[in-house]
Image (cartoon, rainbow, N blue to C red):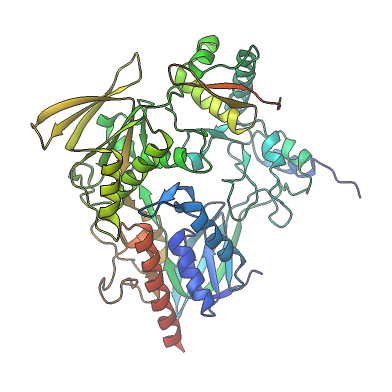
């Protein structure tokens, strides 16, 4: 049941937000989680598998999402945004906007009858535009809450959904709802943005259909894969010769993001291994400037990929061109090993291993005080070594990639630190 | 108690204007869906074969074939052509 006072506000329902909320809820604190999307899960729920164990991402994420949703001390508000946070004495006054789903969550059974009958087709943002979705839709098969939402901007108001819904859950009278809450502490678990590959026009993303980014490839490899196979977006051909371009938009001063994404080496190696399984005859080439296999089991994972036959070429890719007749791509790169010099290679599919950018949407919500950011626009840690979750604002903490690039285990670790620091902070208020 | 199956639609129709562009896009998708079904009515085909019949760019046909596959109108046969394309066929759904 919805209340007006909670101990902790967690902004973001990704893996770090869920971990923080669950830790605090298990300690007895009342938590409210705000998620801007119609489902919690963040980016992890959209992945195929995780490195270096190759565990199924959904199999790890879904039980945690379910536990978050069902925990008696956690209230989840999906499709909602925090519009302002104002400090009042030792508490925060939080304003929340809940967007209308035009579907009653208490009645919707997730049967998808509305979705099956809706005539509209728009690009499915949860499959990164590889396929379409309806105007009334459930974001993905493991969505939580598993209730439909109507994309009113693309809805043609034909009324089919309302006619066919067996639960009478469609409700076009819904309006945006504003809530004001009081909380004792705030956790920013707002995650990151993927580097938009279009910002490297020389790689042809968005221009050449067979140049895709790594998140799209992860969707093609996931259990809920939109093509039910790994095929080229241009023509549905099974690729035979796939290239990865590492550090696309990271460690790159020319796009203003000089830092390492911490993940693109390992997720590319993960995808290469999965592709070797899905397409045993395919050649996989990874163009890299350094392989940063820094975590537990990462080096072994890298060596395993080499043993499986993945080719690693140390070379900075300068340009990608399309061969019109075949849709194949010419990768022009600087060979940094071997004979050296500028070389070209033909591939039938290229995957851009995009980096991370800070999610800056949260910074403007604090009233009368400024949240300090670091030079790369991530939330600045007040003391990265001793109190990694503390920000410059007392009572405001950060978890996961809100403070900088991290892989999933490190995000979960940082969420553990955040929950410990929040618990200590709230207890100190008494 | 009888339930007016379009009672809340009337409410939003007074407030929200649907653009003609969206309606046209929906009509266009329905046309494409029917054209894909027609192309497949004579038997399973690969995406380049469907594109040739429809006279549309390959990438657009791939997107629409995969979308129709997602909605359950078509499915892959499991057969692969000599030039590495899956064959797609009509499924029961109309």
Q: Is residue A329 left or right of residue A229?
A: left
Q: In this view, does A12 lie to the left or right of A210?
A: right
Residue closest to the far bottom? A430
Give coordinates of residue A316: x percent, y percent.
17, 37
Residue closest to the far right? B1
Q: Name the quadrant containing residue A161.
A: top right
Residue at 80% over, 43% down? B7
Does residue A207 sit above or below A375 in this rendering? above
Count of numbered badges drawn on the protein: 0
Q: Can residue A323 be seen in this view?
A: yes
Residue at 63% over, 36% down? A155
Give coordinates of residue A53: x percent, y percent.
38, 55
Q: Name the quadrant containing residue A379.
A: bottom left
Give coordinates of residue B30: x percent, y percent.
64, 22
Q: Is residue A368 visible?
A: no
Does residue A227 sit above or below B88 in this rendering? below
Give coordinates of residue A81: x percent, y percent.
51, 57
Question: Quadrant location of the N terminus of chain A?
Answer: bottom right
Residue at 56% over, 68% down? A180
Q: Name the quadrant containing residue A210.
A: top left
Q: Which of B19 and A287 is in front in this view?
A: A287
Residue at 57% over, 57% down? A78
Q: Which of A59 and A263 is in front in this view?
A: A59
Q: Which of A46 and A154 is in front in this view?
A: A46
Does residue B23 sit above or below A314 in this rendering? above
């Amino acid at each position: 049941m919805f209340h007006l006072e909670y101990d902790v506000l967690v902004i973001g329902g990704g893996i770090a937000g869920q971990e923080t909320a669950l830790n605090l809820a298990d300690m007895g604190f009342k938590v409210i989680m705000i998620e801007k999307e119609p489902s919690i899960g963040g980016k992890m729920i959209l992945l195929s598998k995780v490195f270096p164990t190759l565990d199924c991402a959904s199999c790890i994420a879904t039980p945690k999402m379910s536990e978050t949703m069902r925990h008696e001390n956690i209230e989840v508000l999906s499709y909602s945004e925090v519009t302002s946070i104002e400090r009042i004495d030792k508490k925060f006054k939080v304003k929340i906007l809940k967007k209308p789903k035009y579907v009653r969550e208490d009645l919707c059974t997730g049967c998808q009858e509305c979705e099956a009958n809706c005539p509209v087709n728009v690009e499915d943002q949860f499959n990164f535009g590889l396929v379409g979705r309806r105007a009334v839709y459930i974001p993905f098969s493991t969505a939580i809450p598993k209730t439909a939402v109507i994309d009113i901007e693309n809805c043609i108001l034909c009324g089919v959904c309302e006619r066919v819904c067996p639960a009478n859950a469609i409700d076009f009278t819904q309006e945006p709802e504003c809530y004001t809450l009081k909380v004792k502490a705030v956790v920013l678990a707002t995650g990151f943005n993927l580097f938009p590959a279009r910002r490297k026009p020389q790689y042809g993303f968005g221009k050449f259909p067979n140049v895709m980014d790594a998140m799209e490839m992860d969707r093609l490899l996931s259990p809920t894969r939109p093509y039910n196979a790994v095929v080229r977006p241009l023509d549905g051909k099974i690729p035979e010769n796939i290239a990865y371009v590492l550090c696309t938009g990271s460690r790159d001063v020319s796009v203003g993001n000089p830092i390492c994404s911490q993940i693109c080496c390992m997720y590319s190696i993960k995808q290469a291994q999965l592709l070797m399984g899905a397409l045993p005859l395919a050649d996989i080439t990874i163009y890299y400037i350094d392989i940063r296999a820094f975590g537990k089991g990462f080096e072994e994972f890298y060596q395993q990929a080499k043993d499986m036959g993945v080719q690693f070429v140390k070379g900075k890719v300068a340009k990608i061109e399309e061969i019109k007749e075949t849709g194949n791509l010419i990768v022009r790169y600087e060979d940094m090993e071997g004979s050296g010099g500028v070389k070209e290679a033909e591939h039938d599919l290229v995957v851009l291993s995009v980096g991370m950018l800070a999610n800056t949407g949260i910074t403007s919500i604090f009233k009368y005080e400024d949240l300090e950011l670091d030079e790369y626009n991530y939330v600045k840690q007040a003391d990265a070594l001793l109190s990694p979750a503390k920000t410059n604002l007392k009572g405001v903490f950060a978890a996961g990639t809100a403070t900088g690039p991290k892989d999933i285990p490190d995000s979960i670790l940082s969420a553990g630190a955040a929950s410990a620091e929040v618990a200590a902070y709230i207890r100190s208020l008494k | 108690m009888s339930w007016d199956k379009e009672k809340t639609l009337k409410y939003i129709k007074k407030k929200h204007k649907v653009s003609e562009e969206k309606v046209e896009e929906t009509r266009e998708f329905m046309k494409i869906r029917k054209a894909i079904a027609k192309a497949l009515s004579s038997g399973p085909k690969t995406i380049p074969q469907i594109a040739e019949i429809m006279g549309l760019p390959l990438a657009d046909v791939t997107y629409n074939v995969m979308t129709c596959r997602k909605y359950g109108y078509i499915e892959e046969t499991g057969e692969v052509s000599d030039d590495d394309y899956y064959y797609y066929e009509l499924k029961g759904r109309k």
